[in-house]
Amino acid sequence: MSARITPLRLEGFEQLPKHARRCVFWEVDPATLGDQDQLADPEFEKEAWLSMVMLEWGSCGQVATAISDEQSLTDPPTLGYVLYAPPGAVPRAHRFPTAPVSADAVLLTSMGVEPGHAPDDLPHDLLARVIDELMRRGVRALEAFGRTPAASELVDPTLADPDVRPVLESLGDCSVDRCIIDAEFLKDVGFVVVAPHSYFPRLRLELDKGLGWKAEVEAALERLLSNAQLQEPVGAGSSNVLKAGNALQSKQNGYVPPSRVVRSTDNS
């Protein structure tokens, strides 16, 4: 099933899968809740956090939806999503033993793909769209805390080393396995470990150097352009498709559009 990837808007909060709407692993520091192990309304907290980041910094997510038949009376299903933000806006970030995130980087927090119908390359396409967006906004690097296979050993937080216990504290149905991106996936797509750790390394992808992602971004844009063209009636000549094609051509010719961001991402 083909996917259309668009920036997450606050009015599109309901597009996110149920777990993504309720998960506040990154957005709420458990220390602020005292003895409580869950929030009364996690969806409200998640929506409030997204609103704050969007108002102060800008778009902080991408959502992939299925390209459905124009005759369909229902909204197209969501196939996947990815969220990212300045590290200073992510309360969980300071709890990792490999913190802090570099001052010049944006933090990739979570990514999810719905099983069953999503294309196999959707995680790469989502990440390519994030990279394209951040490069246009003048961001120098993308960092993430990864989860190694050894992290599956951390069943009982009370038996874990003191430096990882703060990471393991979770709220509701959130967990390390579910809410931290696999470190092997991050390395496969070009991230490099900059702060090693047995369980939670910090990884970095330099955006100003590209690290091979220019071709990935262009390939993802070509797929999106092709999908958009397939949805247009013959002879419609969609201006959006033309704009996307012009942008892709500009990329291939080495043109880099000016930054559209008015706020600095140096918020750590």
Image (cartoon, helix red, strand yellow):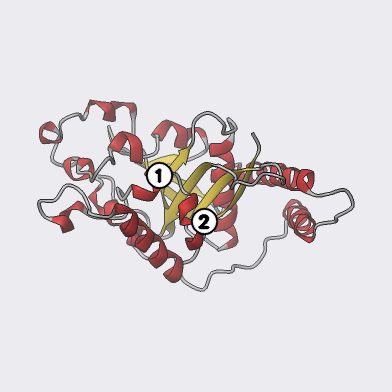
- Report the quarter where the N terminus lies: top right
As rendered, which of 217 and 224 lies closer to the eye? 224
As rendered, which of 243 and 229 lies closer to the eye? 229
- In the drawing, what numbered circle is on residue 242? none
Q: Is residue 67 left or right of residue 52?
A: right
- In the drawing, what numbered circle is on residue 18? 1
Image location (x, y in percent) of residue 217: 64, 46
How dense is the environment of label 2, judged by Cα within 10 Å: few (below 14), some, or many (20 and up)? Answer: many
Identify the residue at the far bottom of this view. Answer: 262
Q: Is residue 101 left or right of residue 245?
A: left
Secondary element type, mark 2? loop
Distance between the alpha carbons at the discs numbered 2 and 1: 15 Å
In this rendering, which labeled residue sits more in front, label 2 or label 1?
1
In which quadrant of the rendered view does residue 153 lie? top left
As rendered, which of 156 and 11 lies closer to the eye? 11
* Residue visible at 15% across and 31% down in the picture: 156
Query: Is 160 above or below relative to 37?
Result: above
* Residue 71 appears in the figure: yes
Residue type beneath disc 2: Leu
Identify the residue at the far right of this view. Answer: 235
In which quadrant of the rendered view does residue 50 lie? bottom left
* Residue 100 appears in the figure: no
Image location (x, y in percent) of residue 177: 32, 34
Residue type beneath disc 1: Lys
